[in-house]
Amino acid sequence: MSREYLKKAPKTSSTDAGDVRATVQGILDEIEAGGEEAARKYAKQFDRYDGNIVLTDDEIAAAADQVSQKLKDDIRFAHDNVRRFAEAQMETLINVETEIVPGLVAGQKSIPVRAAGCYVPGGRYSHVASAIMTVTTAKVAGCEHISVCSPPRPEVGINPAIVYTAHICGADSILALGGVQGVAAMAFGLFGQPESDILVGPGNQFVAEAKRILFGRVGIDMFAGPTDSLILADATADADIVAADLVGQAEHGYNSPVWLVTDNRPLAEKVLELVPQHIESLPDVNRDNATAAWRDYGEVILCGDREQMAATSDEYAPEHLTVQAQDLGWWLDRLKCYGSLFLGEETTVAFGDKASGPNHVLPTSGAARYTGGLSVHKYMKIVTWQRATREGAKPIAEATARISRLEGMEGHARTADIRLKKYFPNEAFDLTGSV
């Protein structure tokens, strides 16, 4: 059967994407030209904050004193899980050395970037978990300096829990700057920070656009859009849990898509009935976000069988993908396009968002077709090297000279010629390039 939309979204994640590029470019240009003074101006304008920018040791300690011991324990638990998973990922990065041909040895090695800039949102929600995810992985990767920027609140500063989290996860500097000015400060090396080699972390459309503009000049984790989630469920799924999981992700923002793909009509109809009830029970701000997200971006798709369900999921390439269905091993082997996969009712996206270990900075808007999420690998440069004996260089030089001349690159060819002449003065070589 063809796919049937029991609920079709009237909008997509790009529908409300305003043209913010000119605004962001102007702010970046002004901050690059005006330096710290310009950054402070925008902090006062947008964050309504004119306090200290770089937190002192005393300010960090004072923030820690405001965090309850129970929350500290939870933060450390999540940090330990993320650290252990990142350390396991590091073990997959091994230096390689191999003899390509006799006498020519080549290899690769992994080198961490020197300075990482981590953006931690702190506006509508205080994203403690984002500090854990970004800073911990940078620390495990071996970055020499880790800067953190997070939006301060007027007359208050950064949320104390974010400060505490960034500090225990390994931040070298914590800056009370949000938005474009925070991204710019890390990229341009303001307030005593080294220029960041990579910028990571989620943020609003202005933060995302600033990272997009700066990409190439610095590395970034990925181009980020609104968070999205898809659930694959069959007749064995619990409709109430499916509905709760959809709503739990819809509360991220008014434009956060959530999708249910199933081969069971009764389940789909029950979820359609339950989602509004779950939304209605949320606190006001969360309810407003979830209402708009479900109304404008939510979808329920009925498929003929599990293969069609899997194909639909791969087409959507969701950031978060949950499977609540039988035969989890089949789904793990079959599914190809997702940021992070949650297999079975016993795990859920919120676990990954907050505390379970794998990173929650993930590809959105279909980018999971070609990339994964943030990991220690994002902070690493995989570089190559080679060395050769003179005998090992001989066939390489001959091939290089001929290929270079075929391409019309005489200068390249001569760098091979001169070595052959020096190393093998009594030998003749055919170094002309021809088709």
Image: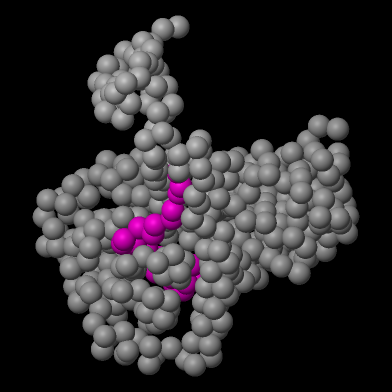
Q: Nearer the viewer, residue 423 or 137?
A: 423
Q: Nearer the viewer, residue 168 or 9?
A: 168
Q: Nearer the viewer, residue 337 or 414?
A: 414
Q: Nearer the viewer, residue 409 or 3?
A: 409
Residue 275 showing in the rendered view: no
Q: Residue at x 51, y 83 (%)?
A: 76
Which residues fall within the magenta stretch? 106-133
Q: Is 138 on the left-hand or right-hand side of 363?
A: left
**x, y (%) of residue 322?**
71, 57
Is 130 included in the stretch rendered in magenta? yes
**x, y (%) of residue 115?**
31, 62
**x, y (%) of residue 33?**
12, 51
Is 34 included in the stretch rendered in magenta? no
Query: Split into 4 quadrants, where in the image is the N terminus?
Result: top right
**x, y (%) of residue 223?**
44, 47
Q: Residue at x 65, y 44 (%)?
A: 337
Query: Split into 4 quadrants, where in the image is the C terminus?
Result: top left
User: On the image, which quarter does residue 365 sit in?
Assistant: top right
Q: Is 209 on the left-hand or right-hand side of 16?
A: left
